[in-house]
Amino acid sequence: MDKVSGKLTVFFEEPFWIGVFERVSQGELSVCKVTFGAEPKDYEVYDFVLKNYDRLRFSPAVATDVKEASRNPKRIQREVHKQVQNTGIGTKAQQALKLQQEQMKTERKSANREKREAEKQRQFELKQQKRIRKHKGR
């Protein structure tokens, strides 16, 4: 059976309160960031989750490790040190948010490019019609 877990972290990031939803499914982490504005009460957060969870746009999945049973603390410390050396800046959630941000950026760029080209085509058509009208003497 597949194990799915979720986590919501609410924190203050000047000047707004931010909520980060993390969802782990089949060993992959997806993240969504929500801006609350003013400090949300517990019941407001609960109400938000109930009403809006299905509308959240999660980032593309990133592979992650599922937590295992307790192990030797020295071994864990060595592994953490290795991971910090290799991965660089940011947590898995931050990396997933960055991936989502880049994906949205490329979508926005392609949509803007299509709008620009459509506008150019429309202007060209108007010029052609004007040329034809002038040529006919109207």
Image (tube, rainbow, N blue to C red):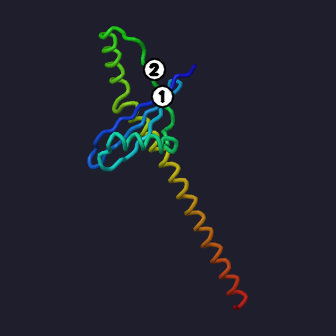
Which quadrant of the rendered structure holds the C terminus? Answer: bottom right
- Determine crowd level at label 2: few under 14, some 14-19, many 20+ residues with C-alpha closer than 10 A: few
Q: Residue at x 51, y 53 (%)?
A: 109
Give the labeled residue for mark 2: 66
Quarter of image, res 78? top left
In the image: residue 113, left or right of residue 95: right
Kind of residue indicated by mark 2: Val
In the image: residue 32, left or right of residue 9: right
Q: Secondary structure at mark 1?
A: strand
Residue 124 or residue 52, whichever sits in front: 52
What count of labels does the image hold? 2
Q: Residue at x 46, y 41 (%)?
A: 50
Q: Residue at x 30, y 11 (%)?
A: 73
Q: Secondary structure at mark 2?
A: loop
Give the labeled residue for mark 1: 24
Mark 2–mark 1 CB contact (< 8 Å): yes
Q: Residue at x 56, y 22 (%)?
A: 2
- Determine crowd level at label 1: few under 14, some 14-19, many 20+ residues with C-alpha closer than 10 A: many
In the image: residue 132, left or right of residue 74: right
Which quadrant of the rendered structure holds the N terminus? Answer: top right
Residue 121 or residue 29, whichever sits in front: 29
